[in-house]
């Protein structure tokens, strides 16, 4: 499945902290989109050349895929939360419930998957 989304249709942001041995932790703000998936997470920045750049840092194709990635499908053999490891951790999520149709489902999954995460839900009809 090719991921597709509208750049102007962000549904929120998330904070991802990378941990590096012998270095200070690095914090990245991710832009969240819905598109043709349950959730798409991108890191966006302007390069030294002035060009806008992005990386897709992760996505959940559907709710079952989210459960697998978050280590919540124990019967299926998915025990590890890939967003809560010694190397990276999702620490904050800010979601616009007016634009993201899976808010309730995502919040339930995240509160089950993380012992320590900050979740902010807001409603804004315009852009984020």
Image (tube, rainbow, N blue to C red):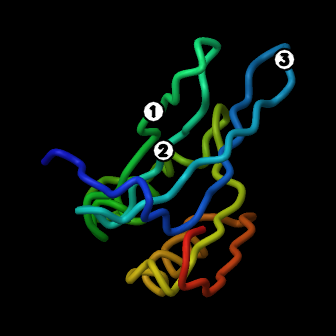
| Residue depicted at x 70% and y 76% | 120
| Residue depicted at x 47% and y 33% | 54
Residue under circle 3?
23
Q: Gap between marks 2 and 3, in whole Å?
A: 24 Å
Front residue of 111/97: it is: 97
Residue under circle 2?
42
Name the spot of residue 13 as percent of width and height, x first: 61, 59
> With respect to residue 14, does 104 lie above or below?
below
| Residue depicted at x 67% and y 35% | 86
Front residue of 115/55: it is: 55
Q: Is residue 49 left or right of residue 5?
A: right
> With respect to residue 53, does 77 lie above or below?
below
Q: Is residue 71 visible?
A: no
Assign a secondary structure to mark 3: loop
Residue under circle 1?
55
Mark 1 or mark 2, which has the lower sequence index? 2
Label 1: few (<14), some (14–19) or many (≥20) C-alpha neighbours in 10 Å: few
Name the spot of residue 34 as percent of width and height, x first: 36, 65
Mark 1 or mark 3, which has the lower sequence index? 3
């Amino acid at each position: 499945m090719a991921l597709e989304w509208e750049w102007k249709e962000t549904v929120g942001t998330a904070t991802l902290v990378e941990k590096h041995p012998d270095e200070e932790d690095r914090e990245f703000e991710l832009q969240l989109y819905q598109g043709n998936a349950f959730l798409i997470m991108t890191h966006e920045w302007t390069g030294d050349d002035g060009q806008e750049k992005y990386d897709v840092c992760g996505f959940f194709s559907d709710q079952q895929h989210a459960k697998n990635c978050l280590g919540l499908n124990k019967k299926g053999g998915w025990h590890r939360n890939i967003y809560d490891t010694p190397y990276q951790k999702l620490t904050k999520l800010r979601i616009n419930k007016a634009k993201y149709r899976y808010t309730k489902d995502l919040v339930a999954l995240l509160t089950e998957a993380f012992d320590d995460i900050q979740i902010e839900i807001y409603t804004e009809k315009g852009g984020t």
